[in-house]
Image: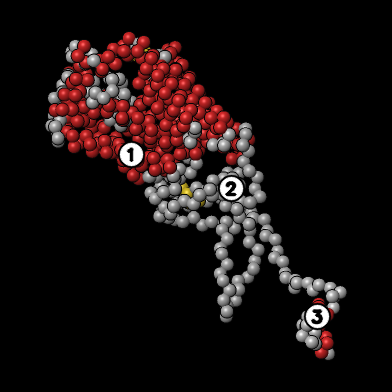
Amino acid sequence: MDNNNIRRASNMSADGLSYRENNPSAPTPRAPLSRRPEPPSEAPPLEQRHIRGRKPVMPQQETVAPEPPVREGKSRPSDKPRPEVKAARTRQPEKSGREDATVARTAVAGAPSMPKQGLMERLKYRVENKDVVRPGDIVRERGGVDRGILILVCLLLMLGTVMVWTASYAEALSRHGDSLRFIRPQITFVILGLVVMFVVMHIDYRLIKVFAWPIFGVSVALLIAVLLFGAARGQAMRWLDLGFIRFQPSEVMKLGIVVFLANYYHNYNKRVNSKKFWESSVYGVFIPTFALGVVCVLIMAQNHFSGTIIMMMIGVFVIWGSGAKKFWLISAAVVALTGIVVIIMTVPYARVRVDAWLFPERFEITAELWQSHQGRLAIGSGGLFGVGIGNSRQKHMFVPEPHNDFIFTIIAEELGFVGSILILGLYLAFIWRGLIIARKAPCTFSSLLVYGIVSKVAIQTLLNIAVVTGVAPNTGVSLPFASFGGSALVMLLAEMGIILSVSRYSYQNK
């Protein structure tokens, strides 16, 4: 090759100028061609693997390891085509530290998505693709239950059972001739409730979402059945007697309204959080408030005003936690409370209780004020450290039904101020741990579900303490985990199983 050709090959002329400047009509040189990588092959569907006792062994297509940097003296790894995997995780979970945690769902690119409408289509999808992961699925890490809240539930249940026995044996022996008249069925319901709790905690909470509407519908039907066939006890008709069991449908509705609202806000989350004011107001406040109002009216028709207030407060807490417009929610709550107060003042027996609370000097201490007065005497008799378990004097036919709504007065008398504060501390710890589980739950439904159940326990505990200490009018509000009761205790432990089920998928250290 001559010198001119060499200069042309190097794009330089003999006088040092560029070849293009000397030859303007020359074609533009092209960039060197590089070998294009082969398109990735279609990833096969991943199988859902659950391996207990050790880390799961996932397929090679599930994760793509980053390529190491190329260094001098080392060969580059082979450029083999890797399957394209799209992760559907919405947020990164915290490290749980548990080796038996398994990744439950991972999305694969190109797979058909789950139909949004039609129950039969969704069920068919789940049956046909139960082992195949689809786009849009939530990646969850399933581990053990939250040990903290499990221990708190067991402690509260154990202390409550002991206090039911020590508060009830005097009245049981005096009126029924059997000191174990109340504690025997209580232990039976505790065992039954624990079985229900351990069964529910191992069920996927998403199954509750599938049956959200049937649960709410059955709860409404039971409330209507109370108005038609209910059994009266005192001035209120709130019991339903089926022969083999007698229970309050309002206790079932406390869970039903929480499930309904959690499912509603999960399905309409985008419209609730819409930037359009009226769209977010209608879907965030008006529709759920209307459903809550219908439930409260059905309960109020039973002359169950304490249940109405508790139900309304549970619904307000769930709606508040959903992120709905606070202006309309506060307005609706104020209107509802005003209406309840007006109705209470028009019902004779309810107005007597309010008057006895506001103007105790107008009533005989042996009549309307007897239970409240004796309860406060029991609290004051406990002193700093109490008189000891089983040594209460006020339970000997002074405090009416000391094992039921006024059981906290016997707790304060036998355990004193220090023991009462410790027990209240257990309730506060339970509420705190439950709110953590709700905040770190994997979806809107599970978060509001736990939030509503924890709110129910907090509201009932607060109202019960307020009633027995004279801060609120005397009304029938049981103390969770402590008051005597069968169906209510089983329902409460079933709700604890739901919280524990959600905690298996919450992103937190166990």
Task: Residue at 61%, 51% (x, y): give it.
Answer: 108
Image coloring type = secondary structure
Is residue 419 in view?
Answer: yes
Task: Residue at 38%, 23% (x, y): give it.
Answer: 309
Label 1 sits on residue: 430
Q: Are marks 3 and 2 in contact (CB under 8 Å)?
A: no
Crowding near the residue tagged with mark 3, few <14, some 14–19, many ≥20 C-alpha atoms within 10 Å: some
Instruction: Work out whether 222 lies above or below 430.
Output: above
Is residue 186 in view?
Answer: no
- Residue 468 position, x and y percent, is 24, 25
Label 3 sits on residue: 19
Q: Give the CA distance from mark 3 to mark 2.
A: 60 Å
Q: Considering only order in the chain, which callout, 3 or 1, is on the residue closer to the N terminus?
A: 3
Q: Are marks 2 and 1 in contact (CB under 8 Å)?
A: no
Instruction: Work out whether 234 lies above or below 387.
Output: above
Q: Quadrant of residue 340?
A: top left
Q: Nearer the viewer, residue 308 or 200?
A: 308
Task: Residue at 44%, 28% (x, y): give it.
Answer: 330
Label 2 sits on residue: 133
Q: For the residues carrying marks 1 and 3, which lies nearer the camera in this image?
A: 3
Q: For the residues carrying marks 3 and 2, which lies nearer the camera in this image?
A: 3
Crowding near the residue tagged with mark 2, few <14, some 14–19, many ≥20 C-alpha atoms within 10 Å: many
Left or right: 347 in relation to 76 = left
Q: Which three-letter amino acid code belongs to the residue tagged 3?
A: Tyr
Left or right: 26 in relation to 248 = right
Residue sitting farthest toward the right = 25
Q: Quadrant of residue 113?
A: top right
Q: Which three-letter amino acid code belongs to the residue tagged 2?
A: Val
Question: Looking at the figure, which quarter contains the N terminus?
Answer: bottom right
Q: Secondary structure at mark 1?
A: helix
Q: Give the CA distance from mark 1 to mark 3.
A: 82 Å
Q: Considering only order in the chain, which callout, 2 or 3, is on the residue closer to the N terminus?
A: 3
